[in-house]
Amino acid sequence: MPTIDALSERLTQYLSHSQIKQVCRAYYYAEQAHEGQRRRSGEPYIIHPLAVANILTEMHLDHQSLMAAMLHDVIEDTGVPKAALAAQFGDVVTDLVDGVSKLTHIHFESKEEQQAENFQKMAMAMAKDIRVILVKLADRLHNMRTLGSLKPDKRRRIARETLDIYSPIANRLGLNSVRVEMEELCFEAIYPMRSEMIRKAVKAARGHRVEVVENITANIRNRLSESGISARVYGREKHLYSIYSKMRDQRKSLSDIMDVYGFRIVADSVDDCYRILGAMHGLFKPVPGRFKDYIAIPKTNGYQSLHTTLINQSGVPIEIQIRTEDMEAMANHGIAAHWLYKSESDQTSGTQRARQWVQSLLELQKNAGSPIEFVEHVKVDLFPEEIYVFTPKGKIMELPAGSTAVDFAYAVHTDVGNQCIACRIDKQLAPLSARLQNGQTIQVVTAPSAQPNPAWLNFVVTGKARSNIRNYLKTQRRSESVELGKRLLNKALSALGKTMDDIDAAHIELVLNETEKETLEDLFEDIGAGNRMAPLMARRLLVANRDTDLDLKAIQDNSRLAIKGTEGLVVSFAKCCSPIPGDPILGHVSSGRGLVIHTENCRNVEEYRDNPEKCVFLSWDKEISSEFTVDLKVYMENRRGIIVDVAAAVNLAEANIEKISVEEQDARLSVTYLSLSVQGRKHLARTIRRLRTIRGVSKIVRIKYPKANQ
């Protein structure tokens, strides 16, 4: 158990006697304020502030930070007013304490907002004085060390929050030792069994590794000695969470990760680092593309080192990090290694970078309208693989990078996704497939009659969107297949002068057993999907066996099936002839696709036309109002502005151009291919008449594509 005397002894290494006395005074003040309070584990509460101060002592933090660590829970937990603290310890320490204190006395709508509000307060103070974040991280680290006394669900929640918010900040500020310990403790709290399993496996593997590590270390030391370079060499232990992350993200086995040996070489100067690199590349074979120079170009958090991967004579991969003592201190303690509050000239590039990041946080906070918005902005900075977009009401939605408006719609609600027809991104109309960017405001336009488009599956990213689209289409397809199957069977029966009412239940049961279907609906679905022929099913339902005197040739087309154009997935329009209302049509029953509609004179259905098992004669519903695509080939002069005239003519005819392409035949003539949306033959004729009035248009042909392009 830590004591103030032991702490005082440690502080003599880098603080003056008067500064140590001030730290002790803060401790005794906190001890008195927390008198009678105990932690969940049963220990006196003062143990926690003292432990936080000990963590900060390892970073060699100044006396004001240590005083704030002692007092960080006084305002929140003991009712001591801020003014009283300021009178005792001054404004600087009080501001640090206030920055770290949790805001428990304010009412929050949700736990998420509470976390965000705390983080906002912390980061605001941090921007003015970066020591606040160091005290806060030490506070969180000690809380993680003592999670054992909490319930498992609370342990997991705190660990998840630490992994999401605090561990990345420690990483960003270069506090590697704090980050690693946090991640290890979080891993143990969230996945205790996985943690234990990897720990045992690493322990078992360590025995086999000792000899290899010793041999490689000896080889490295010998080569350094030959080169006349003085440096420390030691093997690096892999951390459990980093092993787990690599196994999960790179889908590697534990043995693959353990086969790589890590070493660190700490030199006296930058010049020695590059000389050591040359010596190592001479000793072992370097792996191309695996060399990183973070000395010349440091990481954002100020981290500097040379990284290289080598292969020794036995084919063992070796990862080596080469750095100076200063860089080693910076790697482990980051911003705390080079104290910010010395003279400006003492600031290293790393601390300046961290300072800039903190400053950018303050700017974000000023622009953010709410704590939630602010914390999401910060998470965007910490987690670039996620994007954060706004709903029209300002709510923040978190989505994977690469998400589209359809992913956003399903993230809002399944019904919104199912009924979306368009979207506005930052108030501008945009395609549903547009990739979303951080900070955009997305508005989804819905229609009650809309339904998911199968083409969405080509660009959606989120699992929720994908599964909901598939589920809807599957359900929709079944109901449409059942409806179409019923209509086809009724038509086939009426051609034989019968109806479903004429078939007795025993015959239905026999046919269901024969076709291995549980219900009549399943049979209708099979017919609608084109897997079974309606005329055959009609005959078998009437006599319930394969032998009958009913002649299939007797099936007449006097009762044509009416098509509305809105039947959905089980009725499709052939691309070879692009039928539109007014064209004489028939349906080709295609297995798995349902009914494919062609024009009667289409060459692709010549061989089926007289086969009642394969073809259904159809008619267009009188009330049809859907739009259909038709392709035109327009021969016209090559003159400036003629395409504009074509577009204007189509618009005047109230049709719509879906696609347009121009193919030049010679300098004077060109051929334009148009894909138009029209409501029928009359509408098409009206559109063609408009096109014929354009000066320079010589010929218009409706395109029928060659055979086999169904």
Image: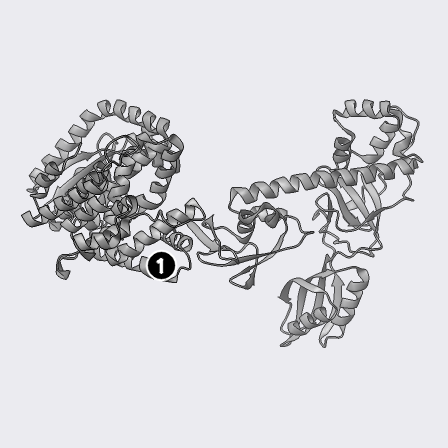
Which residue was labeled with disc 1? 365
Q: Looking at the picture, how far across and down is residue 286, in whole percent? A: 24, 41
Of 358 and 417, which appears nearest the observer? Answer: 358
Q: Looking at the picture, how far across and down is residue 183, in whole percent? A: 30, 38
Q: Is residue 264 left or right of residue 160?
A: left
Q: Looking at the picture, how far across and down is residue 594, in whole percent? A: 74, 40
Image colouring: one colour
Q: Does 646 appear above or below 74?
A: below
Does residue 115 show up? yes
- Name the residue rendered at 91%, 41% in the picture: 556
Does residue 298 show up? no
Q: Secondary structure at mark 1?
A: helix
Q: Does 653 appear above or below 383?
A: below
Q: Quadrant of the N terminus?
A: top left
Q: Looking at the picture, how far across and down is residue 329, in whole percent? A: 16, 45
Res. 258 image quadrant: top left
